[in-house]
Image (cartoon, rainbow, N blue to C red):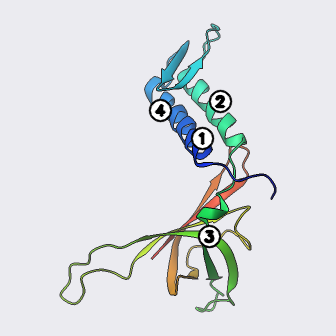
């Protein structure tokens, strides 16, 4: 793995830069621009090459994504066991995936027997820092925090080079 984990200031700066690039595209869209600033984030491009807001925002986002670091280990505090469907209505033997993050959610259920559902949420699996990481198919079961959840969706999050940065599993 190597390298030091980013500081909170570095993480915040990265987040702001990516958000600013996205905001620039939303603000300037397809139109030609010579430069713009959003807060402390500035982009200048005064050459008359027909540069659009989309091109500038895309280039800046590419630059940020090239240096996108893995999710810090300090944020990946949970371990999980994943069981994928075996094709016969059951599940294969569990595979351990350590260093994941589980963001729990709970919603209100309006029926006469209970006031809230069993919960669910999103599990973040980092491609580098989560030991045993793999793309978990929807329909799998994941055991985390003493509960078993159904994986309703697996969203693959890639950098602009097509490499997987992390997966987001929607569980219920």
Q: Which residue is mark 3?
A: 100
**How would you rate the neighbour count of disc 1 (Cα within 10 Å): few for under 14, some for 14-19, many for 20 or more?**
some
In depth, the one of 92 and 107 nearer the eye is 107
Q: Looking at the image, do the residues carrying marks 1 and 3 touch, with CB atoms under 8 Å apart?
A: no
Q: Residue at x 64, y 57 (%)?
A: 71
Local secondary structure at mark 3? strand
Q: Residue at x 67, y 87 (%)?
A: 94
Give x and y (percent) for residue 166: 65, 59
Q: CA distance from mark 4 to mark 2?
A: 13 Å
* Sequence-wise first label, 1 or 3: 1
The dot on residue 14 is: 1
Give x and y (percent) for residue 141: 56, 83
Give x and y (percent) for residue 28: 47, 23
Local secondary structure at mark 1? helix
Q: Is residue 116 above or below residue 89?
A: above
Q: CA distance from mark 1 to mark 4?
A: 14 Å
Q: CA distance from mark 3 to mark 4?
A: 30 Å
Q: Which residue is mark 4?
A: 23
* Sequence-wise first label, 2 or 1: 1
For residue 95, side relative to residue 100 (left or right): right
**How would you rate the neighbour count of disc 2 (Cα within 10 Å): few for under 14, some for 14-19, many for 20 or more?**
few
In depth, the one of 14 and 88 nearer the eye is 14
* Sequence-wise first label, 4 or 2: 4
**How would you rate the neighbour count of disc 3 (Cα within 10 Å): few for under 14, some for 14-19, many for 20 or more?**
many
* Sequence-wise first label, 2 or 3: 2
The dot on residue 42 is: none
């Amino acid at each position: 793995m190597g390298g030091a984990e980013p500081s909170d200031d570095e993480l915040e700066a990265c987040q702001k830069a990516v958000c600013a690039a996205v905001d620039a595209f939303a603000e300037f869209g397809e139109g030609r621009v010579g430069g713009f600033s959003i807060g402390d984030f500035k982009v200048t491009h005064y050459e008359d090459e027909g540069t659009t807001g989309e091109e500038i925002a895309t280039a800046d986002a590419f630059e940020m994504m090239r240096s996108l670091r893995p999710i810090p280990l300090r944020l990946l505090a949970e371990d999980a066991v994943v069981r994928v469907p075996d094709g016969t209505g059951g599940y294969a033997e569990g595979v351990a995936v350590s260093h994941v993050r589980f963001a729990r959610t709970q919603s209100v259920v309006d029926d006469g027997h209970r006031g809230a559902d069993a919960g669910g949420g999103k599990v973040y699996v980092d491609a580098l820092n989560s030991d045993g990481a793999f793309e978990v198919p929807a329909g799998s079961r994941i055991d985390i925090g003493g509960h078993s959840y159904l994986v309703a969706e697996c969203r693959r999050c890639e950098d602009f080079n097509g490499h997987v940065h992390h997966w987001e599993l929607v569980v219920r």
